[in-house]
Image (tube, helix red, strand yellow):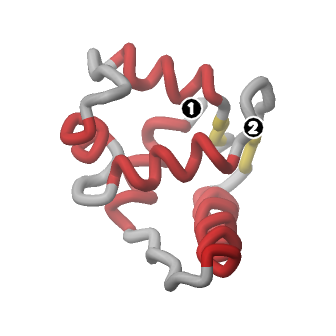
Amino acid sequence: MPYILSHDVLDDVLKKHKIKSNDLTGIDKLFGGADGYYWYHTMRHLCPRGEVMVWRTVDELRASIQGHEDETAAEDEVKPQALKDAHVEAIAALLSTG
C-alpha cells in the first residue's frame, strides 16, 4: 500500500482532524503520542516544500524517516531519537493512500 508525504498532505491531515499547526498536544496525539510533534516536524524537513515522497511499504517509510533523523542528529552531533512503533503505525495510517 503506498504512503505519500508532502507538505500539502501533512497540512490536509491536520485540517481533516481539525488540528492547528501550533497545537503541539494535538499533533502529538495524532502522530502516535509523546514525541509525535517531533516526528511530524521531522517529516516536514525530510520532504522539501513542493515535492512529494512515496513509499511502497511501511518498512520503507520507517527507514526513510529514521534515516533522516540519524543523518541530521549526526550533523548536529547528538544522539538520534528512535522512531517507536506507535509513531510508525500512526504515520502510516495518516499517509496511507489505501
Q: Residue at x 77, y 32 (%)?
A: 52
Q: Is residue 52 above or below residue 77?
A: above
Between 88 and 40, the one nearer to me in the picture: 40
- Front: mark 1 or 2: 2
Quarter of image, res 27:
top left
Name the spot of residue 5 as percent of width and height, x first. 65, 37
Q: Quadrant of the C terminus?
A: top right
Graded by Cα atoms within 10 Å as few (under 14), some (14 to 19) or many (20 or more), the crowding at tag 2 reads: few
Mark 2 residue type = Pro
What is the secondary structure assignment of the residue under circle 1? loop
Write the residue at 24% across / 54% down: 33
On screen, 95 above or below 36? above
The residue under the point 59% across, 41% down is 44
Query: Which numbered circle lies on residue 98?
Result: 1
| Residue displayed at 75% across by 42% down | 54
> What number of labels is visible?
2
Q: Which residue is mark 2?
A: 48
Q: Position of residue 61 (x, y in %)?
A: 63, 57
